[in-house]
Image: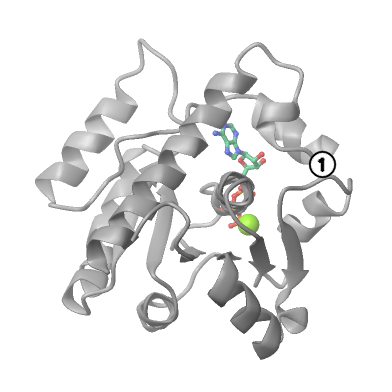
Amino acid sequence: MGYNSPVVITVSAYKGGTGKTTTALHVAGVLGQQAPTLLVDRDRVPSALRWYRKRDEWPFRAVASSDATPELLREYRRTGHIVFDTPAGPDPEEIIAFGKHSDLVLIPTTPDALAIEALVDTVRDLRDEAVLFRVALVMVPPFPSQQGRRARAAFQKARLPVLEAEVPRAAAFHHAALQGRLVRDVRDRRAGALWSAYQEIANEITAAVGEKA
Ligand SMILES: Nc1ncnc2c1ncn2[C@@H]1O[C@H](COP(=O)(O)OP(=O)(O)OP(=O)(O)O)[C@@H](O)[C@H]1O
Ligand SMILES: [Mg+2]
């Protein structure tokens, strides 16, 4: 399975505010450069759609859950990629169901101790159910903070699959949301590097899906 094979990704996390919507939008942005891509906003508070509707130049299409008809999903499933953004606080059964309906569940998390403990506890269910998932560290504070490194060590100790690529904490993401843009299009000297982080994340998850197939 190569780069252009269709992938269905669900972005989910137990905690709120861990960068799900930001991650879903940017992963859809990267995948959308390769093949037609659909972002489905499954949140009752549709922040991905609010972000999306601020402008009309996007490399992907975004719809509310209610507009994601079976025909539309089939079309993208066949020819391109689908990314689901989901609300915070799913129960383990919901995540397992996401896993069964997608090729991979992507779980963004901040690198703080509480977020990690919560994740390590709850993610065991996914492993038991043989759901393919990857953890992505996001909002990682800059050096000299050791939070990112510590989080990575904690995940490795718990044998949780964490992506190598991580997304730094950066105000450019706030600006991107406010302006209705992808971070690569925000005027910021780090914009290119922040976009690259999501490119690497998309590459790693596409590769993980390919290995499974
Ligand atoms: N890498 C980052 N650096 C700094 N701020 C970020 C980063 N990623 C996201 N944010 C900001 O963190 C906040 C939460 O992000 P986001 O809305 O993507 O999380 P969420 O998990 O979708 O939240 P919710 O659970 O409410 O749906 C937003 O203000 C967003 O702009
Ligand atoms: Mg969200």
Q: Taking 160 as reference, is 36 left or right? A: right
Give x and y (percent) for residue 62. Answer: 74, 63
Which one is in front, 81 or 130?
Answer: 81
Number of residue marks:
1
Residue 85 can be seen in this image:
no
Which one is in front, 124 or 208?
Answer: 208
Q: Taking 121 as reference, is 100 left or right? A: right
Name which residue lies at 78% across and 60% down.
Answer: 49
Going by the numbered disc 1, the residue's amino acid type is: Gly
Query: Label 1, on which residue?
Result: 180
Give x and y (percent) for residue 57. Answer: 84, 45
Which one is in front, 146 or 57?
Answer: 57
Q: Quadrant of residue 88?
A: bottom right
From the image, which quarter does the C terminus lie in?
bottom left
Q: Secondary structure at mark 1?
A: loop
Name which residue lies at 20% across and 70% down.
Answer: 127
Q: Taking 1 as reference, is 212 left or right? A: left
